[in-house]
Image: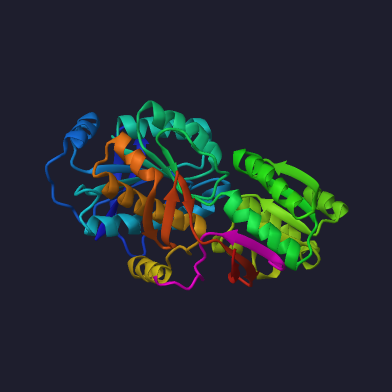
Amino acid sequence: MCFQVWCQTGVGVRSTVNFPARGGPTFPPSLLLRNLSSPAADCGLSPDDSVFFRRRGASSKLRIGGFICCSGSPGVWGPCATSSAQLAVAEINKRGGILGREIELSIYDAGGPLDDILQLAEQAIAFDEVDLIVGLHTSAVRVALRKVTTRNRIPYIYTPVYEGGEQTPGVMAIGETPRWQSRPSIHWLADVKKASRWYLIGSDYVWPWQSHRAVKRYINETGGQVVGEEFVPLGEDNHEPHLARIRAAKPDVVLISLIGTDSITFNRAFGECGLGASTLRLAGAMDETVLLGIGADNSENLFCASGYFPGVGSRANDDFQSRYSAMFGLNAPPIGSLGQSSYEGLCFLEAVAKKAGTLSMGPMLAAARNVVYSGARGPVTVRNGHARMPMYLAEADGLDFKLIKTV
């Protein structure tokens, strides 16, 4: 098995290089990755699908654009997300593809300026003839990108934790939302740790904005109070002013909605200035990849709530990690909840297409409203467009997360 990397040098102009799937290189942001594994047999098209493929150029392959952050603050999740998507594609193609169509996957960097990402999406649809988009990127990108996918009638699966409430026709979101992710953990910290004073800090874009609105309600349910809140520009790495305000406010818990490298630099500074010994932290968009960057010395009293941790003991998770290691070797990108979600997105697509019996937009979106799919998290139920999965609360223990309870 091998994968071919296309380096985009202009519209429709690419240079190519082949490399083995095992132990492949780290991908620069400009790379497009196309999966060449496990060709599926061509077969006749249904009436619905004949319209679908005629629009896209009558190809028997299903061309999926993986819009994954490979740069910027959330770029830390790019390597795991890319590898997880590759694994899903290889497995699905080995099973015969999606409704008999081989998946052809291209990766586009969704970590740069919004205008650049939107231009990439337009080019992917017009020139690469992408049929469907799977996204692992910020909600700010999703809000902008869904205008492109809606106009072009391109189905769009959004995989990571997000603020909830996505109802745009054609967009399917499967990540954790505050009601199920944050609320139980806030109640647990209030009950068990007697936390009542909260300080909220997040990146300055839509996910933290909307999530904090919900979080304030959950804090109020416990009788607690918010003693401070601020939003930090993406890419900010000078956290001294924020830490000074936190120290002055004397919270019991700092709820952190910073992403990627911003979360790493903040939590490092938090630990180095001594706040970690006396103040609890609760993070939403954090995984082992970020924890590695923070370091064991700066992770004291750091909690995280998520629908997936590598340490969850289940057959589905054990099998996923075994296949991941077998495909990418000992030096594979560390598995974390954010990156792994791109695997979940493709598993979700497979289940939806099987239920709908077609890749035509209408039937597929109807099927996606209520479906059960299986991935590394085990069975996940989507009801009325909202994903339901076990949610875990964990505490940092060195460079790993130790599971406390299912919440």
List x then y, in percent, for residue 246: 81, 52
The quarter of the rendered structure image containing the N terminus is bottom left
Q: How is the image coloured?
A: rainbow
| x then y, percent, for residue 255 | 71, 54
Residue positioned most to the top:
151
* Res 115 visible: yes
- x, y percentage for residue 89? 30, 54
Is residue 126 depicted above or below 205 in this figure?
above
Is 136 situated left or right of 392 in this image?
Answer: left
Residue at (17% x, 52% y) in the render = 40
Decide which of 57, 406 is in the foreground and name it: 406
Relative placement, left or right, of 106 versus 112 is: left
- The quadrant of the image that shows the C terminus is bottom right
User: Whole-percent x and y of residue 379?
Assistant: 40, 61
Residue 153 lies in quadrant: top left
Q: Which residue is at the far right?
A: 248
In this view, 3 is above or below 156:
below
Q: Is residue 83 magenta?
A: no
Q: Nearer the viewer, residue 407 or 209?
A: 407
For this rendering, which residue is in front, 366 or 23? 366
Residue at (71%, 60%) from the top-left corner?
281
User: In which quadrant of the rendered view does residue 53 lie?
Assistant: top left
Prevailing secondary structure of the magenta residues: loop
Q: Is residue 232 left or right of residue 166?
A: right
Q: Is 369 left, or right, of 61 in this rendering?
A: right
Specify whether residue 26 is in view.
no
Q: Which residues are magenta?
A: 298-315
The residue positioned 51% from the left and 46% from the top of the image is 71
* Above or below for 97 versus 170: below
At x 84%, y 51%, the residue is 244
